[in-house]
Amino acid sequence: MLPTDILEEEQEQQNFQTYQIYQKMRRIAFYRLYRTAKSPIFIGFAALFFAICYIYIFQPHFPDELKKSYFGEPDLIITSPPIQRRSLNSPNTYDIGILLIVSEGADLSEYQLAINTLKCYSKLHHYGFHIEWVNNTWYELCGQKQFMFIRHCIASNLLHKHEWTLFLDADVAVINPTRLIDTFVQENEKVADLIFFDRFFDWEIAAGSYLAKNSNYSKEFLMKFANSEFSLPNSFSGSDNGAIHWFFVEQFFGNYTSQLNSNDCYKIWEISKNFDDLFVYEACCRLILGETRLFHDPSGKGTVKVLPKGEAWMRDGWITDTKWSQEVDFMLHGWKHSIEMPTIDEANAWSRASFRLKFGKWYRAIQNPTFDLNSCSNGTITWKWWSTYMISKIELQNLLMKKRVKVRQQFFQFQALIPKYLKKL
């Protein structure tokens, strides 16, 4: 046997021995790992690790709610001072009515607290207040099939009851009764027949609330808006929230040209399948509308104004987790009892943490269990608030500014998708 063969054989034996040692050590390691994995301590730590990961990912609010359950301090009740009622003899006082329109068979208990605040506020300040139910008579008169559109036809037909009408969704609550609707009329009566506003959490013009003058143009505009139901594309249209943007483009930019053709927006709307598509379509329309705030009818019949974010009579309360300021806020939107955050006495920490993940959830910032209408009528009523949700003007402005910046970034992102959508057409 050659020396090289002997060396190769020795090398093979050495490699084999090394391999045997490796296998033995591997079996020992697996055996120890197996014994460790079976130990109660290891199982406990592993379970704790996975529980923490699950809570962090799926229940991020659980630690906070658990802390509230055991260490939360009782909240304080803040009572409003005597409320100065609206003077009926002032030159700045207007004939104003609040109008709610609800679908036939609607369960008003879903909006009970919000409606109670509106009723009391109306009696306190001598505003008209009316809830109109959609019924067969209205369906025959107006012709629209969808509630979200027929309500604008009904509003058009009821404007004659007051000089100005504030149209509201039923889930809007008065959080600050010292504010007056007259302020918004006084600021805009000489420049507009109808006043809409921009929603805060996106770039939509709000369709669920507006202030309308009893004028022929207001009635005609709302009737045309109601009839926009008949031009809805067979897509994810967003109902009247989506339709109002195309309606504005048609009404005020029908004879104008721009770098972006208005028909392009409608084509995007036609292929909309979800909220992302809808937001791209709305961003397209807002690019055409630009920064315009006063929209003049081309034939000179009247004017519509759209207030910027944060300058209207109401906003979505959930965007600040129901935090509000007496110096800024007036009405909060979204107070449906089905998404009202349960209290510590009503649900455990796990259930509350799960509830906090719901879109639009809100906290009962008003402590008043009921509103006595006699006290509202004679002016002795006071609003009672939970102090937890009351913040300063600066604190609220900081919260809203963060939201404003985020929405602005999102608008640019959706706007940038328009060319991609147009390629699909």
Image: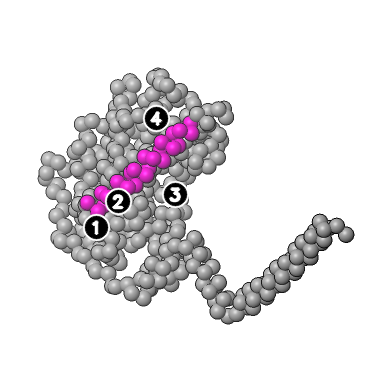
Mark earlier in primary sequence (3, 2):
3
Kindly check if marks 3 and 2 are in contact, taking CB atoms under 8 A apart as contact: no
Magenta region includes residue 340: no
In this orientation, which residue lies closer to the viewer: 13 or 322?
A: 13
Residue topped by disc 1:
391
Taking the spot 53% from the left edge, 31% from the top edge, the residue there is: 421
Residue topped by disc 3:
103
Could you tell me residue 14's position as x and y percent? 75, 65
Gap in Å between the C-alphas at discs 3 and 1?
A: 36 Å
Local secondary structure at mark 1: loop
Kindly check if marks 3 and 4 are in contact, taking CB atoms under 8 A apart as contact: no
Mark earlier in primary sequence (3, 1):
3
Q: Which quarter of the image is occupied by the N terminus?
A: bottom right
Local secondary structure at mark 3: loop
Gap in Å between the C-alphas at discs 2 and 1?
A: 10 Å
Local secondary structure at mark 2: helix
Kindly check if marks 3 and 1 are in contact, taking CB atoms under 8 A apart as contact: no
Mark earlier in primary sequence (4, 1):
4
Kindly check if marks 2 and 1 are in contact, taking CB atoms under 8 A apart as contact: yes
Q: At label 4, which amino acid type do we have? A: Leu
